[in-house]
Image (spheres, rainbow, N blue to C red):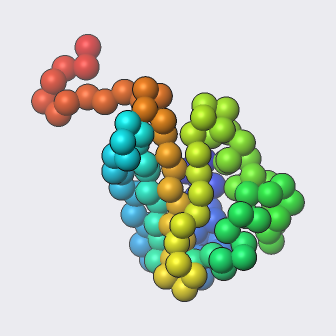
Amino acid sequence: VFFNLIDNSIRHGEHVTEIHVTTRPSGDDLVIIWEDNGAGINAEDKEHIFRRGFGKNTGLGMFLAREILSLTNILIRETGEPGKGALFEITVPGGAYRTRVQGTDAG
């Protein structure tokens, strides 16, 4: 999934020079935020990019990313503003991830 996001930023982002990945809590969920500083995605294409066959190449990349994530109830959506870069929010449901307090032994 992340390989596909990198690939799309490079291929379709029109001169992407920065990619940022951050996280934030949302209730019990964890939201992973992927954003680049490229051209962004047109408003009318935001849902279409996840359809099989949509796009300039095989049209499988974002379709498969959403399918893979959905197997574990993880959601992905594009929420960026056109012209300001792509912004994907990947929502991991509470209980579907583990956390470790910094400085503690995970063993």
Residue 15, visible in the rendered structure: no
**Viewer-nearest residue: 28 or 61:** 28
Classify residue 74 by image quadrant: top right
**Viewer-nearest residue: 63 or 94:** 94
Question: Which residue is depicted at the point 36% across and 55% down?
Answer: 22
Question: Which residue is depicted at the point 42% across and 40% down?
Answer: 29
- Quadrant placement of the C terminus: top left
Q: Is residue 68 left or right of residue 51?
A: left
Kindly give the residue lying farthest to the bottom in the view shown: 83
Classify residue 82 by image quadrant: bottom right
Residue 37, visible in the rendered structure: yes
Estimate the x, y position of residue 61 in percent, counting from the top left.
73, 55
Q: Is residue 75 left or right of residue 107?
A: right
Question: Which residue is depicted at the point 83% across and 55% down?
Answer: 52
Kindly give the residue lying farthest to the right in the view shown: 53
Q: Is residue 2 left or right of residue 35?
A: right
Estimate the x, y position of residue 25 in percent, counting from the top left.
34, 46
Estimate the x, y position of residue 44 in percent, counting from the top left.
72, 76
**Viewer-nearest residue: 84 or 4:** 84
